[in-house]
Amino acid sequence: MKKQPADVWVTWEEYHRLIELLAVQVHDSGWQFDHILCLARGGLRIGDVFSRLFKLPLSILSVSSYRGESGRDQEQLLIGPAIASVTGQLQGRMLLIDDLVDTGLSFREVQSWIASHHPDVTEMKTAVIWAKSGSQVRPDYFVHDVQGSPWIHQPFEAYEEMSIEDVKLRLKRK
């Protein structure tokens, strides 16, 4: 029986450092892009920081593949019907951002969706914090090359197990 890699736990401080490392890597590559498109939910925080650092508006596409009660069940990929953007029609060079690439299915399907819905996008590169070794897609930019497929516990996942009543109780105790 093959041993699964241990889960990875990430603090808020480490998470922000990783976003900054990714931003520096993209900047130092010299590649110029016209648009930032993040995949929600995982890429939202990363996209927000990139939008501020690179002084470009943030476009958002909602996708979902992990669902179920625990949020860990990988199911059929759902892609939202439209991109939320203040820039109008997307065109030119686009940086596609997510938090991680696991199987690569999301990136592959989203890239195909963008090509069919936004034909004026002339070039697209991808950026993530974590690239898992079993992925069918290799991102253009990534901070960590993760061997195997450990679950990466990001700091905001604490809210997955909470209700608004839990938050109210915690705030009341403070």
Image (spheres, grey):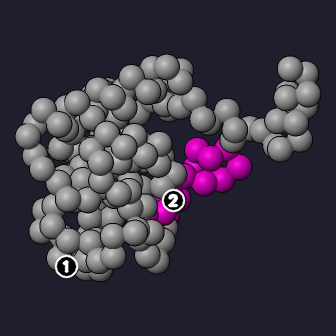
Identified at 58% across, 49% down, the residue is 73
Residue 49 in magenta?
no
Residue furthest out toward the front: 55
In the picture, measured across the screen, residue 92 lies left or right of residue 159, that is: left
The x and y percentages for residue 44 are: 47, 48
Q: Is residue 62 magenta?
A: yes
> Nearer the viewer's eye, disc 2 or disc 1?
1
**Residue 172 appears in which quarter of the rendering?**
top right
In which quarter of the view is residue 133 placed? top left
The residue type indicated by label 1 comes to Pro
Q: Residue at position x 82%, y 35% from top?
A: 167
Residue 64, label in figure: 2
- Left or right of 16? Residue 153 is right
**Residue drawn 45% across and 20% down?**
14
Q: Secondary structure at mark 2?
A: strand
CA gap, disc 2 and disc 1: 23 Å
Location of the N terminus (image quadrant): top left
On the image, the x and y values in percent for residue 145 come to 27, 28
How many residues crowd around disc 1 within 10 Å: few (fewer than 14), some, or many (20 or more)? few
- Per the rendering, the mark at residue 119 is 1
Find the magenta span and give its range: 61-76
Residue 164, given in percent of the width and then of the height, sits at 83, 44
Label 2 vs 1, first from the N-terminus: 2
The kind of residue tagged 2 is Ser
- The vertical placement of 72 against 79, above or below, is above
Find numbered disc 1 in the image and state the secondary structure of the residue it sits on.
Answer: loop
Tell me if mark 2 has few (under 14), some (14-19) or many (20+) residues whose alpha carbon lies within 10 angstroms of its own: some
At 26% from the left and 59% from the top, the residue drawn is 35
Residue 174 visible to the viewer:
yes
In which quadrant of the rendered image does the C terminus lie? top right
Residue sitting nearer the eye, 128 or 138: 128
- Residue 89: x %, y % from top left: 29, 77
